[in-house]
Image (tube, coloured by chain):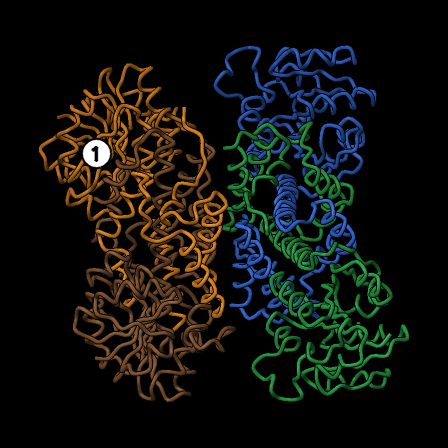
Chain colours: A blue, B green, C brown, D orange
Amino acid sequence: MKLGFLGLGNMGRAMARNLLRAGHEVAVWDRTPAMAEKLVSDGARLAWSPADAAREADVALSSLSEDHAVFAVVLGGGAADRPDREPLIRGLAPGAIHVSLSTISPAMSRQLDEAHRAAGQRYVAAPVLGRPDAAEHGELVLLAAGQHEDLERCAPLFDALSRKAYLLGDRVERANVMKLSANLVAASLLEVFGEAYALAESHGLEARQVFEVLKDSMLAPQAIAGYGERIANRKFEPAGFRLKLGLKDVDLALSAAETVALQMPFASVLRDRFLVAIARGLEDEDWAAVATTLPHKRAA
Amino acid sequence: MKLGFLGLGNMGRAMARNLLRAGHEVAVWDRTPAMAEKLVSDGARLAWSPADAAREADVALSSLSEDHAVFAVVLGGGAADRPDREPLIRGLAPGAIHVSLSTISPAMSRQLDEAHRAAGQRYVAAPVLGRPDAAEHGELVLLAAGQHEDLERCAPLFDALSRKAYLLGDRVERANVMKLSANLVAASLLEVFGEAYALAESHGLEARQVFEVLKDSMLAPQAIAGYGERIANRKFEPAGFRLKLGLKDVDLALSAAETVALQMPFASVLRDRFLVAIARGLEDEDWAAVATTLPHKRAA
Amino acid sequence: MKLGFLGLGNMGRAMARNLLRAGHEVAVWDRTPAMAEKLVSDGARLAWSPADAAREADVALSSLSEDHAVFAVVLGGGAADRPDREPLIRGLAPGAIHVSLSTISPAMSRQLDEAHRAAGQRYVAAPVLGRPDAAEHGELVLLAAGQHEDLERCAPLFDALSRKAYLLGDRVERANVMKLSANLVAASLLEVFGEAYALAESHGLEARQVFEVLKDSMLAPQAIAGYGERIANRKFEPAGFRLKLGLKDVDLALSAAETVALQMPFASVLRDRFLVAIARGLEDEDWAAVATTLPHKRAA
Amino acid sequence: MKLGFLGLGNMGRAMARNLLRAGHEVAVWDRTPAMAEKLVSDGARLAWSPADAAREADVALSSLSEDHAVFAVVLGGGAADRPDREPLIRGLAPGAIHVSLSTISPAMSRQLDEAHRAAGQRYVAAPVLGRPDAAEHGELVLLAAGQHEDLERCAPLFDALSRKAYLLGDRVERANVMKLSANLVAASLLEVFGEAYALAESHGLEARQVFEVLKDSMLAPQAIAGYGERIANRKFEPAGFRLKLGLKDVDLALSAAETVALQMPFASVLRDRFLVAIARGLEDEDWAAVATTLPHKRAA
């Protein structure tokens, strides 16, 4: 396939290389030309503007750092009158696809969809999970949303880029929401480890010991699946561990931490969250029911 | 071995049964005699007070709901003058061991240790991880701390009760801290799922889809081990994902949630925690470094 | 009146002195005798145990640091067999009153009430608001709950101790809850100033300038009364400032703080609280309606 | 003076009227023409675009709802090619002043400053504190930043609009930061009342009683000034109330709230904040020192 690739940071460069290896023709562009030049020896053609990279492409892929960069490169912004900044949307042919691999806001993703649609082009949101080394080895997980036929056309690209592509329907922003949800879980894990280790270390245990125990218990795959599925299915009976006992244990942890002047903000939030659940009458339900007490509206 | 067992709720009953099955003689006691009677057909002897259950035992085990119950049953409290409430400590022979399986405060555990020591008895803290069904099948994880020779004497009991006993040294309260740390991780996971699912569902995704993706990415065993070990070892270079980009993604998640009036209190805390890390100059470190920014003192 | 006074820290000593000045006979006791001796030159009699201080008193007052101290001094605890620790309750005559001036838990206050009642004695909860210098000048605010006739008997004492005594009915623990609510407001103010000043200072303003503006606007007496009364009366119409605009402003503050890596945990909580209110459909109500969205049960 | 006024919501209309009453000539514009027409009977001239309102003005004032609206009306945005949306900046004469009364981000304020400067115009940030009824009576507090000579030229307008204008120097964004800090304090007060009242009401007290006590103690002007000034001046000695006792009281409040399943998220944060302070060794300082423990960088 003829491809354009925009944004050649650590992630983008690794992905572009995989596309080249898979036999595609790739025109590359980066705001910093030196980044793009690194791919010439891999067979890439150097494009001199986003539009140029997209011009002859069946599919143009972008891997950029955030909303503002995407706006500038894809739709054009402040410097759009510089010829070397002519935006992707002005080069992409009618019917050609823009695949956005970046982690951007759902709102920006929807805006891209509308802009491409208005220009007679196609848009697929396809943010990826994984670090640069996973990208290099084609071991990313890819989260794709777009029109069915566009996703099909992109399948060989997804194969080259990832070990697994999840197809999430035609509402493009959902792929971005999925990405944000997944990242939130990872970020939360960091704090979870931080608080558990700090509590243990402040009492003379070693963090490594804690991880050994966790890996064998709360963080064993079947334990994680137990909670993850139970909550997804909202199946809280029979109660394996009652919510009010959960509150008791969180209180014990907070008290133990107080003796060493350790703040544990997640634990403090948990206490409040369990109280909300108890105020709703869930005290004798399985403690996983706490996960169901976040009110919200529904996106349009 | 001759054993006493005090506290025959769902957890205690299952554990006492495993000890009977393993061939030990067990005298059983519960505040509610009907709970104890259920074990007579399994071969248990009915004791008429905590002290009576402990009287002839080499090892007396207790599985009680919380600090106050432990205080009353083991050390004696308000109703200690009723003969049927004579506390464990008055019955246990010198040199015999009390194994506390309950989830109690580290402070209470230390208090038990001192009281038994003063009475010429031995004390082992051995809280367990796992639900009643795991207890039934001897599949608990047991966290034990106490004098080395006492832990050795208890080894056959730990074998009967658990699939794995972690020996955590002679500072008894550390077993209780480990238990609280592990429970905190599990409780946190509930909220993590709650927020990630709510964000996704409010945008039209299904929670089950989110779990499928998570299981294959952020919550895959190697991903969890990656974070858990990296943080335990405080090894944050090279940076796989920079902390300031982590903040960006948390901000995107918070903004997406705001559009559906969804509060995500863990995400709000994360935002604050990343800011603390950035204020300390960690913005270009691996985002896992956020886990190292909780100041505390050290327990005496 | 004949009085006993137990606990002669900075607060207690100042209060005891005011009672002496008002012409009462006061027997004083403190765990550290040197503290009590300071009052002898003011005319106090040195008591050698809590019970001794209470023995001939019409009213025994206690000013102690926390629940455990109150338990030990009033009801007797570990060291109750030492004659110099004989607790207040063993000395106080039937019909005589114990006035607890300490900041203790509502539960402990109720426990004291029951114990004194069982002993044929009377109990009044009367925690105070104010610092040692206010105590010295009789400028405290006193929060009293107890039986009507007991409060009447204590009126001259309250006059000597405080510039104003609020009588809060016969449920003793309510005085303690009122005290805790008031202290929570003061503690919150500290953090409120901390966050507002930090946001301003990080952008080059001076904290003193901020306070000048606040004193003249948000923290002017009529502004505070406006919010305090509006919320107490749950009167949110007409909306002076709509809740969704309030969220917008909190978001702006959070964003401005993010540019200087400043965490503002109260602001983060506010964001979540406004979202909860909006999820409940309150977005066009006066923003003060956010104060009504904390679910809870009611104490027995 | 010849004035333009853009944005005639509740706030804007009241302010524009005061300017008319003060004898100024005012051309008015609102996105919804009917809003502007209401002022014709007061003597205003109806402008047909933002630029038109600004064309002959010495000073053009804008009162708009948020950043996006300001961007569109002042600098021009999506619909800028519609003649009736020609932005303010295209109409304002060189040397004339734009006074932005809106609550906007400091970043947007700086952007306006730069844009006007580039166009040879002047810019003053002047957000206001107060509700529509205060605006009507000229009782607003105005927070102004800009070049000294521009602030002087605007003085008569500030007089007509407000009872007091605070002049905050020539860094325009500081006026906006001050506004956000002040609003944050007001928003925090709402939650403070919410939590204090909920704790009290759940225990049978009335919110009005709580406010009576607070008004006479923690929220009396001298008490507020005591904390506000002490923290501004970072003067924490002698300690009126030690930080570790503050933590004790917050813990008591949290425990009392737990008995009625009441979450108090500010109180939970306070607990964590006191712990941070104690981990830094501040436990025996005045509790107001907690306000100094928020790390941050400094804006450029």
Please tell me which residue lies in front, C6 or C141: C6
Say left or right for C30 vs B147: left
Chain hosting mark 1 = D
Which secondary structure, mark 1? strand
Task: Locate the C terminus of chain C and report the quarter of the image it occupies.
Answer: bottom left
Q: Residue furthest right?
A: B23
Say left or right for C123 vs A137: left
Task: Locate the N terminus of chain C and report the quarter of the image it occupies.
Answer: bottom left
Counting from the top left corner in percent of width and height, residue D248 is at: 44, 59
Counting from the top left corner in percent of width and height, residue A237 is at: 69, 69
Depicted B212 relative to depicted A33: above or below: below
Depicted D70 relative to depicted D181: above or below: above
Say left or right for D275 vs A2: left
Please tell me which residue lies in front, C31 or A285: C31
Look at the image and tell me whether residue B118 can be seen: yes
Residue at 62% over, 42% down: A187
Asked which quadrant contains residue D168, the reply is top left
Amino acid at pointer 1: Tyr
Residue at 39% over, 61% down: C292
Q: Residue at label 1?
A: D166
Q: How many marks?
A: 1
Counting from the top left corner in percent of width and height, residue A261 is at: 52, 50
